[in-house]
Amino acid sequence: MILVNNLKLSLDTDFNSLKSTVEKLLGAKTDNVYLYRKSVDARKKDNVHFCCSVLVESKNEQKLLKKCKNAQVYINKEYAWLKANSLPQKRPVVVGFGPCGMFCALALARAGLNPLVIERGNDVDTRQKDVESFLNGGPLNLESNVQFGEGGAGTFSDGKLTTGIKDPRCRAVLQEFVSHGAKENILIDAKPHIGTDILVDVVKNIRKEIIALGGTVLFGNKLEKITIYNNVVKSVTVNAKQIDCDTVVLATGHSARDVFAFLRDSGVAMQKKPFSVGVRIEHLQEDINKALYGKFYNHPALSAADYKLSVHLENGRGVYTFCMCPGGEVINSSSEENGLVVNGMSYSKRNGKNANSALLVGVNPDDFPSDNVLAGCELQRKIEQTAYNICKGAVPVTTVGEFVFGKEPSFTKVKPTVKPLYTFADMSEIFPSFVTDSLKQGILEFDKKIKGFADESSVITAPETRSSSPVRILRGENLQSVNVRGLYPAGEGAGYAGGIMSAAVDGLKTAEVIINTQNLL
């Protein structure tokens, strides 16, 4: 089988008769043709088209390889799920059931190690009710919300599966999502996403397999302490109950600040790391489609357009967009009393009226308010509490017209999507000046790349502070803590991932180390 890359196909291509289309392009007969990868090339607005890779089966593969400069032999490398040769005396404990913890637990369960999963939040069905209640004006559940619960923060997101890492495990993660309920197109799309509505069932199905294989998943169980003696893990305390263990995977996510605090107090090696803060910016999705697709903006073969932008400003700051949600909404993602934070979310159809994206400014340890290793958390919390206090619990919003151009704010073309309550606010009261100054410059720079990005009617919602962890829990080449044996910091919260895919991959890598270590005993 050969892989042929960079095939330019019209937006009107009938992918149900792909074989004949590819044969015409190649000028050769084939036995079978399969679509492997599809992306949209919209660099030229008068020639928007698909750029595809296809797998070709042919009796004359050598001839095709010589004929097609973009062809190569395709070698399918299936991910090998490891098996354990024996059971450990104590079950491995996985703390957190987001993408990292979920895939780590799945790999451990398939290996036969019967993992015990501890998740502070509720199962996804109960969690949905908790979040829905909050977004309709009910009280915030501090342990079950957009940040905490089955599936992690990614469950209430766009379900974006793009990543900058080049790891063969990525394909395995996508295949598992499909086998547990996601649509098969995520295996083909260059920018795959699932959508929060489908993710709910996917994470539930993965949990069911873990349990069927001998694992245990406990919801509403909060990690309170890790007992360490002579730099070795001895037990965890969960809901005031001590559980003896010698292997703990710490996959708690970057919002579990209480975990960071007791790790620091226990002497676990950690360091401050850069992160980003900023806002969500909303435009009409139709305007983004027009700006990126030109006259093809309403072509039925095209999905809602997305973008990814970055700029390095003269002041030395980087400004970039993150987690762009086509046809999505901004969501109140708070997880602490008297604090406020927002994020973006899309459903699988991405058919909402607005597009939104995080608009972020890089923050360095030099910007932190103290030398405390958790000073980044302090800065995040200060911004979140300030936002909450000045708006009395409502979500702070404004317009690009007010924020960038100093005009009286009013919602005209673009309406805010965030719930339950929002109110106009002065962003300079929420953020340090280097953040607001950089955001203003960034918006103007991005308008040069996407016409209308600085449209005065665009809505700004604040604050977005949880894009990545402000700390890194140091680990060695064996993925264990550098100073505590048996402790495996993993995923986003530990500072080793930046999204659903990279977190899931880190979970698999961590499980592999644990399984291989067990097999050496």
Image (cartoon, grey):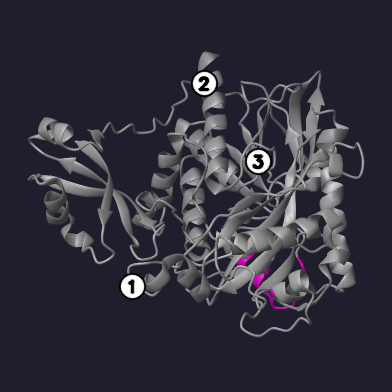
- Of 490 and 298, which appears nearest the observer? 298
**Residue 333, label in figure:** none
> In terms of sequence position, does the residue under pointer 2 or pointer 3 come before the other?
3
Q: Which residue is mark 3?
A: 251
Give SS at disc 1.
loop
Q: Amino acid at mark 2?
A: Asn
Tell me what residue is drawn at x 61 percent, y 21 percent.
478
- Of 242 and 291, which appears nearest the observer? 291
Q: Is residue 442 above or below residue 486?
A: below
Q: How far is the residue under mark 1 from the one under mark 2?
A: 49 Å
Quarter of the image containing the N terminus?
A: top left
Residue 114 in the image, given as x and y percentages of width and height: 54, 35
Q: Which residue is mark 2?
A: 516
> In terms of sequence position, does the residue under pointer 1 or pointer 2 come before the other?
1
Mark 1, Cα crowd under 10 Å, few <14 / some 14-19 / many 20+, is few
Quadrant of the image occupied by residue 69: top left
> In terms of sequence position, does the residue under pointer 3 or pointer 1 come before the other?
3
Magenta stretch bounds:
126-140
Tell me what residue is drawn at x 44 percent, y 53 percent.
191
Dominant SS type (magenta): helix
Which residue is farthest top? 521
Tell me what residue is drawn at x 54 percent, y 60 percent.
158
Q: How far is the residue under mark 3 from the one under mark 1?
A: 41 Å
Q: Is residue 303 above or below residue 74?
A: below
Tell me what residue is drawn at x 52 percent, y 74 percent.
287
> Which circle, 3 or 1, is nearer the viewer?
1
Residue 65 in the image, given as x and y percentages of width and height: 17, 33
Q: Amino acid at mark 3?
A: Ala
Which residue is farthest right? 370
Q: Say whether residue 239 is visible.
A: no
Q: Which residue is mark 1?
A: 300
Give SS at disc 2.
helix
